[in-house]
Amino acid sequence: MPPTDAPKRTPNILLAPCAGRSADGYRLGQGGGYLDRALANPTPAPHAIEIGQP
């Protein structure tokens, strides 16, 4: 864990593993939605680039 007095940082770019997308537009992959929940609220939001196999 970082020290409590460390400045909060939000990345500009985030690489996200992706197995595909559902019909509703949700990203499919392992992790139970933790990455999607983490990306839901940061300000400013990072640009997420999904990486997957065709």
Image (spheres, rainbow, N blue to C red):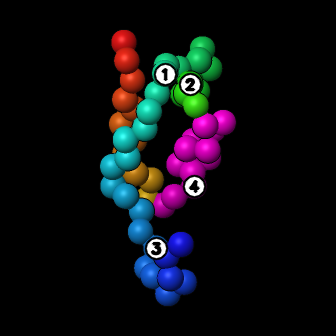
Question: Compared with residue 17, is residue 3 higher up or lower down, i.e. above or below?
Answer: below
Measure how far apart labels 2 and 3 are at the Cα level: 28 Å
Q: Callout 4: helix, strand or loop?
A: loop
Residue highlighted by disc 4: 41
Q: Are marks 2 and 1 in contact (CB under 8 Å)?
A: yes
Labels 1 and 4: the sequence-earlier one = 1
For the question of whether residue 40 can be seen, the reply is no
Q: Are marks 2 and 4 in contact (CB under 8 Å)?
A: no
Measure how far apart labels 1 and 3 are at the Cα level: 30 Å
Magenta highlight range: 31-43
Residue highlighted by disc 2: 28
The foreground one among 2 and 37 is 2
Percent of width and height locating residue 36: 57, 41
Q: Callout 3: helix, strand or loop?
A: loop
Frontmost of labels 2 and 4 is 2
Give the residue displayed 37% in from the left and 18% down from the top: 53
- Name the residue type under label 3: Lys
